[in-house]
């Protein structure tokens, strides 16, 4: 191994991988925003924010401070320091279609290169659909904020109601493979439910990726309404739905059936230092609902989960009881009960929870560019000019998804150091950051 490798992962090696496998710099050169004749290209703005995420910087302020360094400016093709203000102004009017196409291209390339083959369940690729609230505020708000009323009780016991503004999105992520990219995001529009946004997202995925990009979709019963289930059936995706009591007809008929008999299956499994002792019941051919009488398979478990916890200097063993129910289109011959149990829990495992990861380790919830009024203007139909709709938050989240998938693909699929020494993905981000400062500053021709 070459000597320089011992100091960790280096930026030129990361850039080389991205260009060779994903044609990354050329795609970045095609990105556009709403500014006219800007000093800094949209490509430089994109590369600045992309690397900010790859380096795991926590804020735009920190990114701006680092962008005062000539090595960073040179790396992203900026003629001089790029201010926070330029980043915001460009991103608020960024062309989202270009970023989406880039994400689709990256994910399709990964699939073609068989990156999703490892971890398949009976040969099937598994994706999960879920929602996340990205920010909330009582004061700052924009045209596309969602609103809700929140009631407070003051110290004298009087209640007061205030309006809270927030943004929420639904995302779809591949979770069976070691590299777990987000395929697409859909933002909730004011006044609409999460199931409507989810339906829009599910319709979009086959258009962008082709229908069989993945095979099994895990989702919460919140999204499992008739139109979504008809759509998944039409596309050919199997579903595993985590089911709660709110759909009482099916829940109660299944419960009535199961309570009258002993468990069909009992097993134990250890995962993440916990012991799961599971009793499982299952039945096929239960109609999903009155308006969607499609026969489904129902799997129910009662689980005792035992783990050791530290309490002061003592280790205490605790056992908690849990009950779960899933509805699935997967047949019992190919996917035995234990496999449905495992798929049903897959969404809740930490390593599969991209939403958690983006929040905790990738600064997702920092409300970048929310309610930013400093935006490029375009001429309106009435002859005046008006600010472009604010696309900043959506643009930043797409860039974050690109940094998320490309950083982990680089580490997991490409890096020998990762296979040998298993550094964390966070540490690799820091190594790339440190290597930026070791790059030779550009040699400028004398004026
Ligand atoms: Zn808003």
Image (cartoon, rainbow, N blue to C red):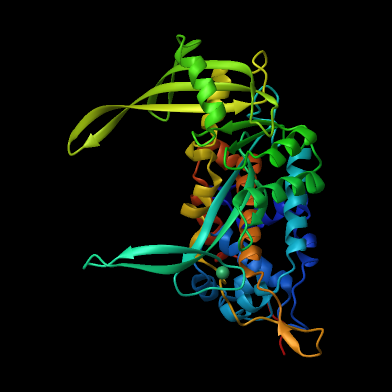
Q: Can I make out residue 20 in this image?
A: yes
* Residue drawn at 81 percent across, 47 percent down: 207
Question: Quick one: which residue is furthest to the left in this view?
Answer: 313
Say which quadrant the N terminus sits in: top right
Q: Is residue 259 above or below residue 194?
A: above
Q: Quadrant of the C terminus?
A: bottom right
The one nearer the camera, 323 or 93, is 323
Q: Against 131, is 116 above or below?
A: above
Q: Residue at x 80, y 61 (%)?
A: 26
Vertical position of residue 150 compared to residue 404: above or below:
below
- Judge whether residue 56 can be spotted in this image: no
Picture residue at 75% right of the left edge, 68% below the top: 95
Between residues 345 and 383, which one lies in front from this camera angle? 383
Instruction: State left or right for residue 93 relative to residue 129.
Output: right
* 16 over 164 or under it: above or below: above
Q: Which picture quadrant has residue 90?
A: bottom right
Location of residue 346 (image quadrant): top right
- Where does residue 83 sit, x and y in percent of width and height? 58, 80
- x then y, percent, for residue 43: 73, 69
Image quarter for ligand 1 equals: bottom right
Residue drawn at x 46%, y 69% as measured from the top left: 163
Would you say 391 lies left or right of 342 here? right
Whole-percent x and y of residue 336? 60, 15
């Amino acid at each position: 191994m070459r000597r320089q490798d011992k100091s960790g992962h280096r930026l030129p090696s990361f850039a080389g991988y991205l260009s060779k496998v994903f044609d990354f710099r050329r795609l970045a050169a095609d990105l556009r925003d709403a500014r006219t004749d800007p000093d800094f290209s949209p490509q430089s703005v994109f590369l600045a924010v992309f690397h900010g995420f790859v380096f795991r910087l926590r804020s735009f302020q920190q990114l701006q401070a680092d962008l005062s360094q000539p090595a960073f400016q040179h790396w992203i093709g900026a003629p001089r320091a790029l201010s926070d203000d330029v980043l915001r102004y460009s991103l608020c009017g960024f062309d989202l279609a270009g970023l989406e196409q880039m994400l689709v291209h990256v994910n399709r390339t990964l699939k073609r290169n068989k990156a999703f083959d490892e971890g398949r369940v009976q040969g099937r690729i598994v994706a999960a659909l879920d929602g996340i609230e990205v920010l909330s505020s009582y004061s700052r708000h924009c045209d596309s904020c969602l609103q809700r009323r929140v009631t407070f009780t003051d110290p004298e016991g009087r209640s007061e109601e205030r309006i809270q503004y927030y943004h929420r999105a639904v995302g779809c992520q591949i979770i069976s493979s070691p590299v777990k990219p987000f395929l697409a995001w859909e933002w909730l529009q004011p006044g609409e439910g999460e199931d409507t946004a989810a339906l829009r997202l599910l319709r979009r995925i086959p258009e962008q990726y082709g229908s069989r990009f993945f095979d099994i979709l895990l989702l919460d019963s919140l999204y499992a309404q008739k139109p979504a289930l008809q759509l998944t059936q039409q596309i050919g995706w199997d579903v595993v739905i985590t089911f709660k009591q709110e759909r009482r007809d099916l829940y109660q008929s299944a419960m009535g059936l199961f309570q009258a008999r002993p468990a069909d299956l009992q097993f134990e499994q250890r995962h993440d230092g916990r012991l799961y002792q599971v009793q499982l019941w299952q039945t096929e051919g239960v109609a999903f609902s009155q308006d969607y009488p499609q026969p489904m398979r129902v799997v129910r478990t009662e689980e005792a989960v035992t783990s050791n916890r530290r309490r002061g200097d003592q280790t205490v063993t605790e056992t908690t009881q849990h009950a779960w129910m899933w509805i699935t289109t997967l047949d019992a011959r190919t996917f035995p009960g234990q496999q449905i149990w495992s798929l049903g829990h897959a969404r809740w495992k930490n390593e599969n929870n991209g939403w958690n990861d983006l929040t905790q380790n990738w600064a997702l919830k920092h409300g970048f560019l929310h309610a930013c009024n400093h935006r490029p203007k375009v001429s309106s139909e009435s002859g005046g000019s008006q600010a472009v709709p604010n696309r900043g938050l959506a643009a930043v989240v797409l860039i974050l998804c690109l940094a998320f998938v490309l950083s982990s693909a680089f580490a997991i699929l490409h890096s020998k150091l990762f296979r040998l020494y298993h550094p964390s993905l966070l540490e690799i981000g820091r190594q790339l950051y440190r290597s930026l400062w070791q790059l030779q500053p550009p040699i400028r021709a004398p004026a």
